[in-house]
Image (cartoon, rainbow, N blue to C red):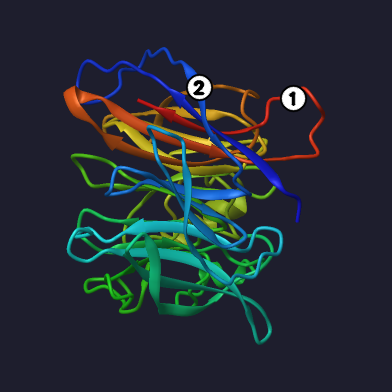
Amino acid sequence: MSTVRVRLLTAIIAASAAYIPTSVTAQTRTVASGLDTPWDLEWGPDGAIWVTERPGRVSRVDVATGLVTLVGEIKVTEVSESGLMGMAFHPDFASQPYVYLAHSYRALFGIGNRLIRMRYVGGRLTDLETLLDDIPGAGNHNGSRLAIGPDRMLYMTTGDAGDGSRSQDRSSLAGKVLRLTLDGKPAPGNPFGNAVWSYGHRNPQGIAFQAGTNALYVAEHGPSEADEVNLVEPGRNYGWPEVRGACDADAERVFCSANQVMEPVAEFTPTLGVAGAAFVARDTLLVTALSGRVLLRITLTPDGRRAAAVERLHAGEFGRIRGSSRRCGGAGSLGVLLASAVPARRAAGANPAAVLRTE
């Protein structure tokens, strides 16, 4: 494992309404440093920035001072893409201070993934509970992002763990978007009577809900082509491994017709390694990219089913951009976090890894 140096940057964006307008200007400044392979980051209910690091650490960053405080360490199996991943907060955090986390562990026959929750008490995470385990894991195609939906259910993305057949198997937890109660049980109303909300995914790592419509979008890695941004609907098939991107090859058209495959809102070839996702306006979705080292600003059509425009921001400036999160502030301002990680062995003089905050 290579150590990763991270800067935490602040970018200031003026917003005159409830959402950031299409045209923005930004400034950046360093806030904090010293994180190792940050994977997810969220604005916490306590006003701090919470960050997961893949080796197993959870930290809080004081926005005003840049102080990084370790609040918990989880024993994980970190092999390539596996380790500590997604994070979410209980919607009633003040009275039920639960933090939900997804992480990898050493299973009997390789790597597994599980969903846990911990209580935040006295500045530390404690009382670890396993809510769901035996999710197939691997050193690649490993997922996994978490989000609390407007319906107060917990949504979890999972990768196919290197076996595409799992994605089409509705009894498998791999290659899916899962919908769970806040106790980790299959949510009522799920289309197949289990935890599965949608299937046919390869490796979704970004998840975001659209304000106003409550529509769910995920960003997922393609193979050598066709990274996808998908509008997720319950019970729908997203095609992997039979379909890559749109249903535009003869064999894909046959499969799509027979299986009611949902085509992507946007796709990217060659792949960019799309990762984190966050809405900054009702029709504007920000998606981060790892190998592409770029921030994608996607403007959706009015029905939300296609990309009307895609802009590439900060190309090559901040290294591999992974995570994103948003919050609303006073006077219509909006904060967005973007996390990236670049190995410390990178050539001297190159721009180090960055976590950006836009507001």
Image quarter of residue 243: bottom right
Residue for badge 2: 29
Question: In the picture, which quadrant includes the N terminus?
Answer: bottom right
Q: Nearer the viewer, residue 210 or 69?
A: 69
Q: Is residue 305 at least partly visible in the picture?
A: no
Q: Position of residue 315 (x, y in %)?
A: 61, 23
Residue at the bottom extreme, as displayed:
108
250 lies left or right of 134: right
Calculate the distance from the C-alpha at mark 2 to the C-alpha at mark 1. 17 Å
Residue for badge 1: 350
17 lies left or right of 186: left
The local crowd at label 1, few if under 14, some if 14 to 19, many if 20 or more residues have their Cα within 10 Å, is few
Q: Nearer the viewer, residue 305 or 41?
A: 41
Q: Position of residue 99 (x, y in %)?
A: 35, 63
Q: Position of residue 283 (x, y in %)?
A: 30, 30
Amino acid type at image mark 1? Ala
Disc number for residue 128 = none
Q: Secondary structure at mark 1?
A: loop
**Figure check: 156 above or below 31:** below
102 lies left or right of 248: left
